[in-house]
Amino acid sequence: MIKTNAIAIIKQQYEALGIVFDYHNHNNGPFHYAATLDGLVFEIYPLPNNTTQPDTTLRLGFEVPHLEETLQKLALSHWKIIKEIALTSYGKTVIIEDYDGRKVELKQQ
């Protein structure tokens, strides 16, 4: 789960990675976006009322089928490229940063 005060922008950014979200809430909780990725639930929540800054220490990682094509799509959705495509011992990777400042590593499937 990530929390943000820019929920529409963050949702758009992660949708550009191919993630499909549903909008819902649990009982009396806040409305939020949720997606299931290979059995993992990934959620985007609004920041709690007493919080003004999102946590940017979390680092996420996703595999994408076509890394270069994905990067082209990201140019239209507020992503910042932190480290260009590199061939590592894990494969082809790139590091990007979302609107809030969270680092995300993308790896070619």
Image: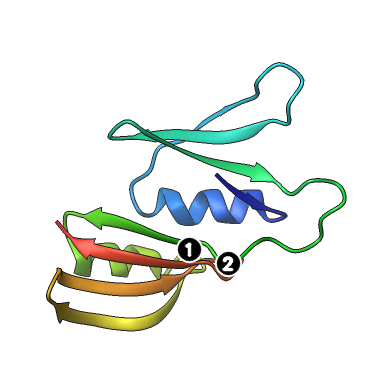
In the picture, measured across the screen, residue 46 lies left or right of residue 77, that is: right
Q: What secondary structure is marked by label 1?
A: loop
On screen, residue 64 above or below 57: above
Which of the 4 image quarters holds residue 46? top right
The residue where tag 1 is placed is: 77
Q: What secondary structure is marked by label 2?
A: loop
What whole-number distance in Å separates the C-alpha atoms at marks 1 and 2? Answer: 9 Å
Of residues 100 and 75, which is closer to you in this image?
A: 100
Earlier in the chain: of badge 1 and badge 2, it is: 1
Q: Residue furthest top?
A: 27
Please name the residue shown 23% across and 79% down the image: 85
Residue 70 place in picture, x, y as percent: 27, 62
Question: The disc labelled 2 sits on which kind of residue?
Answer: Tyr
The residue where tag 2 is placed is: 99
Please name the residue shown 74% across and 49% down the image: 47
In the picture, measured across the screen, residue 13 lies left or right of residue 46, that is: left
